[in-house]
Image (cartoon, rainbow, N blue to C red):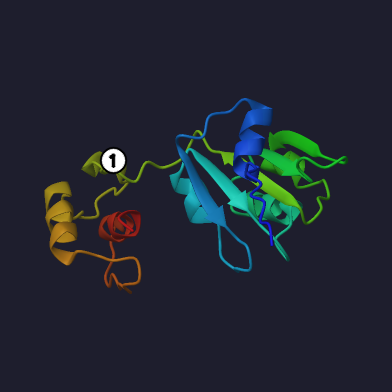
Amino acid sequence: MIVEKVVGINCLQYLMSKTNLSYETIKIVSLHGRDKSILGAVSYSPCTFILKRGQHKGHTICQSLVEAGLGQVMVTIGENLSLEDERIIAGTAEDLSKFIFSDLTVLLIENPQYVNKDINFNDEDFKRDSVAITKENIRLITLGKLQIKPKDIIWDIGTGTGSMAIEMAKSL
């Protein structure tokens, strides 16, 4: 038996080469056989690559972005990459939500307005009128002591401005 090794490129490399985009800052999310939301990745990353299959269609992903208030993000959709009927389309999520895409589709979502979760909020970032706020240094010390992990369930009871809840959510 003779085994022949054939080396190819993956769909991320292929799409990046076709669009002349760089992929140093890309967050890669696979929806292959998974039912999960991409909203966190898109909200907290400047660039998100979505590998999808099944019920997750390119247009339904774009529709979910629009429904979440992210209709302005730029999306590049690669459909049937390297095949005869290859199609690469770029536009806002809102624009591309009006198209229909096949199952063999990957998405590159660029969000210049992403939230950098590594930057701490200042007290001035919270609108509070006369409501007391947990001060920035207390929030940071508390977060450090809590050592929150992604699977932890946290309840913030008595939230005034929500500053602690926001900092905890951002830390995940």
Apparent side of residue 89 relative to residue 46 in the rendered image (left or right): right
- Give the farthest residue toward the top: 20
Residue located 69% across and 62% down the image: 1
| Most distant residue in the right direction | 85
Q: Position of residue 28 (x, y in %)?
A: 52, 49
Q: Residue at x 34, y 46 (%)?
A: 117
Task: In the rendered view, tell whether residue 25 sits above or below residue 62.
Answer: above
Question: For this view, does 122 lie left or right of residue 103?
Answer: left
Camera sees residue 165: yes
What residue is shown with label 1? 119
The residue shown at (66%, 46%) is: 6
Q: Which of these two is toward me, 142 or 88?
A: 88
Q: Quadrant of residue 54?
A: bottom right
Q: Quadrant of the C terminus?
A: bottom left
Residue 138 in the image: state x and y as whole percent. Answer: 12, 54
Residue furthest to the front in view is 1
Q: Residues within 10 Å of mark 1 (few under 14, many from 20)?
A: few
User: Foreground residue, 165 or 92?
Assistant: 92
How many marks the image carries: the answer is: 1
Residue under the point 28% across and 40% down: 119
Q: Is residue 74 visible?
A: no
> Where does the image place residue 89, in percent across and percent down from the top left?
76, 35
What amino acid type should be assigned to the residue bearing mark 1?
Ile
**67 or 1: which is nearer to us?**
1
Location of residue 72 in the rendering, given as x and y in whole percent from the top left corner: 62, 38
Q: Nearer the viewer, residue 142 or 9?
A: 9
Q: Secondary structure at mark 1?
A: loop
